[in-house]
Image: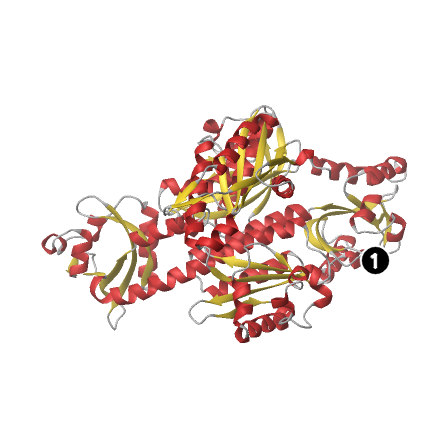
Amino acid sequence: MNFISRLFHTFFSSDDNYNALYRFFDTSSSIMLLLDPESGEIINANEAASRYYGYPLEHLVGMSIATINTLPPERVKEERKRALMEERNYFNFKHQRANGEIRDVEVFSTPINLKERKVLFSIIHDITDRKQIEQELIQKSEDLATQETLFKQILDTSSVAIFLVDMTGHITQANQRMAEMFHYPNKEILQGKEYVELIHSSEKEIGRQKMLALLGSKIASVDLERIYRRSDGSNFWGRLTGKRFYDAKGVEIGLVGVIADIDDRKYIQQCEQHHKQILQMIANTSPLSTILHAMIGDIEAIHHHRIGCSIVLFDETNHKLTLGATSNALELLNSTIINAARTNDDFLTHLTYLSPQPHLFSTLNQEAWWHENIKCITLENAEHCWLNPVVSAFGKPLGLFIICSLQHQPLTLREMKLIEDEVQFIALAIEKSKSDAKLKLAASVFTYAKEGIIITDPYGTIIEANDAFVRTTGYPLSEIIGNNPRILKSGRQEMPFYTQMWQSILTAGNWQGEIWNRRKDGSIYAERLTISAIKDSEGEVQNFVALFTDITTMKEHEEELEHLAQHDALTSLPNRILLWDRLGQAIAEAQRYNAHLAVLYIDLDGFKEVNDTYGHNVGDELLIAVSKRITSLLRKNETIARLGGDEFVALLTDLKEPYECEPIVKRILQSMNEVIEIHGIDLSISASIGISFYPDDSLGAEELILHADKAMYYAKQSGKNCYAFFSHLDT
């Protein structure tokens, strides 16, 4: 699937803006390559690829993949063609490193469009160790009678689940890891169970057929990924490798299977794929309802339908809530919330102006405005349901994202992280939909007077053009008539682009897409172009009609949306999304150079009183002034982000020792104590600061933020206008 090709083209119309997406590519720990499908040249590679293959990045880029792949060049070219045609996107290869070492790898490869150029996007995983273990296990199992002791030792010490199945499909032996993987107290319980009963119901019959085919020697082995079901009813992804095994006389006596728990890898892979798909749908201007239903379906599928989700939209025009998308399990809850908002304006106001963070239902039940209106809904499940406000880049309410555990189980940390990410995508989809609606309205008014039109003869000679064409291109009519549209060619599209365009026109009768052209003065502009073939009754082409709209301004607007998605609208500081990205980079940098970094959680003291006394306008100006003061105290490579309200987070990097940060912390406190004049009003506030350190307090980004937040609250409780270290708390 071309999951990012349109995203590149729609959101990133300049080289500078490609850097935003390439940060993910460059900093990913997964090995990633961009390949020319025809030549096999490595167009781009990330640092992980450079480290893995042992080539400097500047050397690796420009190499042929055939230099790395041990297959004959023709075979490599053939497999690239299969990936390009999307006949297959998963491969097993042997790759050679710079030091001559040959490693087994699995490659996920898919075609994308990059600046109107089709390339292959490949993710590589080293599976040498796994394959070696699997081969060793199978080899040892072929002589079970003479190597039983060694086999049992492998079973008991292996990090993967290993089991034996007899000719009837029942488990005869399993290691302790398999019992742990399926949440059984001991491995003996598994003995005698039918293997297919461990498979998820959706794949059970397929699993049975595969097992029978393997037992019947119809297939040599199995190597696949599937969903398994644990004893407590939960599900997980596992990778199964299975093969027949024989007794000392060579008689087949059953199957040996190896299951690796790949649930975490699969979860990350599915989340990444989900987000790429949603971004592609947003870029393709898919209907909002389609995007929201896709979100709900993907999230529930990723979690094996253990959770239910719904999205409720805020109709600002009519001041009400409407249903965006939902699972069947949450329909009653949604209708209750929507009806309560319709009949109680105070309830709607509280909902739409909740702080932009996840709210647990059991916590909301403590609020009178909530429990008085939400009755008999998920009462027993209140501890496992979350309500997440969706707000625009400007802080305006857009809707609600509701997620509930359908198995009355708490959400995990990775699931909560997905919720935070999903809220941002929902907001982006809603804002993009509103933007598209405005653009369509403008285009409908604009069409009749300002859409460029040209008509050519069957040979491509221009015979007519309208005033809009003249105004847009800068060519006078005298230079247009009798000429060919190729005078507008910018050089940004290669010949294959035009070949494909004309193939579509001559076969389907029309072509529609985006193209970059050049005006007479040499300036480049983007246009959305439609070319149609006009045929006579005999089917012969008489004319070609081209209609285009200048979309340069729209491209610039989409770039602005991308900026707004990562920055706070009020202060222009990085928002939560960009903070997480920079914190991840800072941690990786600190780990690389054995350095320290500090996370400062800053909360203003007395801000609420300012808002209540002087109004939100003064409060907003105060926040802007505070953000400028803190920014002025930090180094260029350090970050100050606004999480919302009067809460800020600062990242202090390149610390040789953790407590090097104390001087800057004291300067921030001193700066906050200085009077701030807003519209002739002298305002006095202070700040409470909580501090956590990497790696002393945590190695993870999420815990560093949580620890700093906890230390901040301690500082507030200690009298405010001070700071506290998480490491000094009595935890």
Q: Quadrant of residue 438?
A: bottom left
Residue drawn at (34%, 48%), measured in percent from left and top? 496
- Report the front residue among 487 and 683: 683
Per the image, the residue denoted by label 1 is 194
- Above or below, 380 against 579 in this view is below
- Above or below, 456 against 524 in this view is below
For residue 163, side relative to residue 500 (left or right): right
For residue 728, side relative to residue 124 (left or right): right
Q: Residue 146: tell me if it is visible.
A: no
Give coordinates of residue 530: x percent, y percent.
29, 60
Residue drawn at (69%, 46%), measured in percent from left and top? 262
| Number of residue marks | 1
- Report the front residue among 242 and 397: 397
- Above or below, 623 against 461 in this view is above
Dot 1, how many residues are within 10 Å of its Cα: few (below 14), some (14-19), or many (20+)? some
Residue drawn at (29%, 64%), measured in percent from left and top? 443
Give coordinates of residue 106: x percent, y percent.
61, 41
Amino acid beneath label 1? Glu
- Report the front residue among 581 and 248: 581
- Report the front residue among 378 and 369: 369
Give coordinates of residue 12: x percent, y percent.
39, 47
